[in-house]
Image: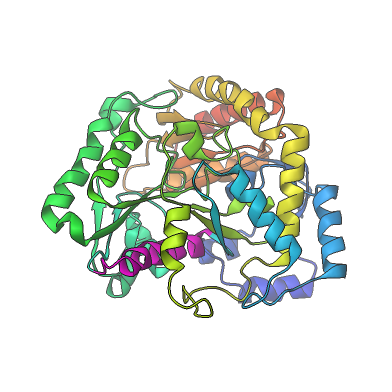
Amino acid sequence: MQLHNSGVTEGLQRYWLPFTANRYFKQNPKLLASAKGAYFTMTDGRKLFDCLSGLWCCPLGHGHPHIAEALKRQAESLDYSTAFQISNPVTLSFAARVSAMAPAGLGQVFFTNSGSESVDTAIKIAVGYHRVRGEGQRFRIIGRERGYHGVGIGGISVGGMVANRKMFAPLMMPGVDHLPHTYSHADMAFSRGQPTWGAHLADDLERLVALHDAATIAAVIVEPMAGSTGVVVPPVGYLEKLRQICTKHGILLIFDEVICGFGRLGENFGAQRLNVTPDLLTFAKGVTNGTIPMGGVLATNEIYDAFMSGQDEAVEFFHGYTYSGHPMACAAGHATLDIMEKDGLIARARALEPVLENGIHQLKGTPGVRDIRNFGLAAAVELEPFEGRPGLRGLRVFERALDKGLLLRFSGDTIAMGPPFISTEAEIKNMCATLGDVIAAVTSPD
């Protein structure tokens, strides 16, 4: 493709892209020019269905006028509010609104700017909670293999994706251990919704308790549905067991709902869909429909109250961000929730779930397809890797799909899908059918 703008040409050499093979990208640049509804348009004119709602963060699609107008009004009235020792009405009202959507008991909101910051905040709250209660020896955090909890030092320490961890091993938090992941190809391949095998894997937490002593463990953190590792769905009964074991030993349970929250699983939060309530819950992404960075942590009233001791004028929790509760982000959040409520989009996501499930499972038997998984309005197709070249098949499918009108998300040889809630049944069926055609056409690494 030709790049006509000299600034873009120079920028192509200067911009260090995240989670991207930069050398390959700069030889084969792919640029988006605009977005509207459920579609992106590339600078070369190709129109692409947004198969993953941006990066799981644009469930309402793109360019919604209500969000644009809300941001304009907010910028004209209060574009920034000092975050420390003072607040503002839009932030306070948004905190009330988010907490009202949360599972019962999670009545306190601490705002951040991303999922990574939310995870690090939740870890600090968990450790601090035990300390203010006189149990400062509780410092260990238990994560899970294949877990993704952002890219902060805390997040990669408790996370379990090897590629995100191996370069930074000297920086890892001490006192972290990991539960086994919950995926077994032999026992749950081509599952529809929650697999029936695997609840027993939660019992490994008892092994870690015996190894480390429960009195040293502050929290367990898991994604209700693990999205970034390729839509790994919790087995029936697994999260319930984790909740029971944590409660038994006085360990806090943290749900990372950066992907699951705000409707992706057909309820406000995954905790409500799965009927398991954590002590802390992280969110981000869909809360502002991806228009302004924002995240947060929901905490139980009990956790919040534990910090509220000592002199009234003393700072209880030495943590926060310049942009915590940013009024522009809160305005975008209000507008996002307005649209979700007015248009019934969380219920719509639930109604579209069987459409995606049936469409994606039609790909079973396609040459190169190793597994298919789905839950909520999310699915993944795992591909057989080309011998000696892992990840190349996924890349080739991604590239060919661009010519067929799909913007996919691939991680290694797994294709993940989480279409916008505004998608039509026909668009989802077409996405699945087109993906099947693309996979069938990619038969070699060349």
Is the magenta region chiefly helix, strand or loop?
A: helix
For image coordinates 57% across by 27% down, the residue present is 437
Residue 133 appears at what percent x and percent y? 32, 65
Q: Read off the magenta span.
A: 115-136
- Viewer-side residue, 257 vs 151: 257
Q: Is residue 153 above or below residue 206?
A: below
Q: Position of residue 241 (x, y in %)?
A: 28, 36
The N terminus: image quadrant: bottom right
At horizontal 30% and vertical 41% (from top left) the residue drawn is 242
Residue 220 highlighted magenta (yes or no): no
Residue at the (23%, 49%) spot, across then down:
249
Quadrant in the rendering for residue 342: top right
Residue under the point 40% across and 27% down: 194
Q: Is residue 2 visible?
A: no
The colour scheme used here is rainbow
Residue 366 location, x and y as percent? 46, 24
Q: Quadrant of residue 350?
A: top right
Within the image, what quadrant is residue 426 found in? top right
Q: Is residue 254 shown above or below 364?
A: below
What is the x, y in percent for residue 174?
25, 70
Residue furthest to the front: 311
In the drawing, does residue 321 fall left or right of residue 328? left
From the viewer's side, name the closer residue of 339 and 363. 339
